[in-house]
Image: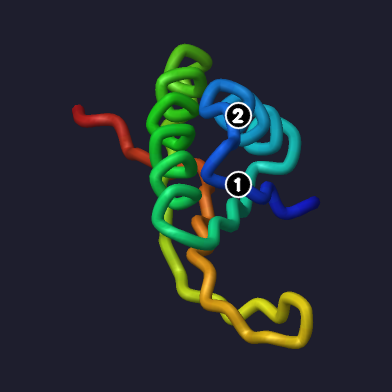
């Protein structure tokens, strides 16, 4: 499973489709964003992907994490969103 990398210029609908597709296929998706604009696009895409998946009866949960990434010999801090289906027990 590949990391979905999001930039400030990423189209939210394309990222949302990628998240939903990876969740359907692998039951887990990881999204990485560096910088405020990229994190903004990633969160908007997550909200949109949540609605796509809800239409298929899949509810997801997201756990955000900080990760250190090395880019051109410099360490940068990124936000990683770990997205997976949640197991909701039906209310009797």
Q: Residue 46 lies in what quarter of the image?
A: top left
Does 90 sit left or right of 74 as displayed?
Answer: left
Is 66 rendered above or below residue 19? below
Residue lying furthest top in this view?
A: 55
Does 7 sit left or right of 65 as displayed?
Answer: right
Does 42 sit left or right of 14 as displayed?
Answer: left
**Residue 73's x, y, as percent?**
76, 87
Is 66 rendered above or below residue 49? below
Query: What residue is shown at x 50% (from left), y 23% (from top)?
Result: 53
**Residue 26's x, y, as percent?**
73, 42
Query: What residue is shown at x 47% (from left), y 74% (from top)?
Result: 66
Q: Secondary structure at mark 2?
A: helix
Q: Secondary structure at mark 1?
A: strand
In terms of sequence position, does the residue under pointer 2 or pointer 1 come before the other?
1
CA distance for labels 2 and 1:
15 Å
Frontmost residue, 90 versus 2? 2
Does 24 sit left or right of 78 as displayed?
Answer: right
Q: Residue 36 lies in what quarter of the image?
A: bottom left
Query: What residue is shown at x 44% (from left), y 51% (from top)?
Result: 39
From the image, tell me which residue sits under label 2: 20
Frontmost residue, 22 versus 33? 33
Give the crowd class for mark 2: few <14, some 14-19, many >=20 residues within 10 Å: many
**Residue 70's x, y, as percent?**
71, 81
Query: What residue is shown at x 63% (from left), y 25% (from top)?
Result: 14
Q: Residue 32 lies in what quarter of the image?
A: bottom right
Disc number for residue 6: 1
Give the crowd class for mark 1: few <14, some 14-19, many >=20 residues within 10 Å: many
């Amino acid at each position: 499973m590949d990391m979905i990398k999001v930039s400030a210029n990423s189209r939210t609908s394309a990222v949302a489709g990628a998240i939903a597709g990876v969740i359907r296929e692998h039951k887990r998706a990881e999204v990485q964003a560096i910088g405020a604009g990229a994190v903004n696009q990633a969160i908007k895409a997550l909200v949109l992907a949540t609605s796509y998946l809800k239409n298929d009866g899949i509810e997801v949960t997201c756990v955000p994490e900080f990760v250190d990434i090395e880019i051109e010999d410099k360490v940068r801090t990124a936000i990683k969103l770990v997205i997976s289906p949640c197991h909701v027990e039906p209310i009797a």
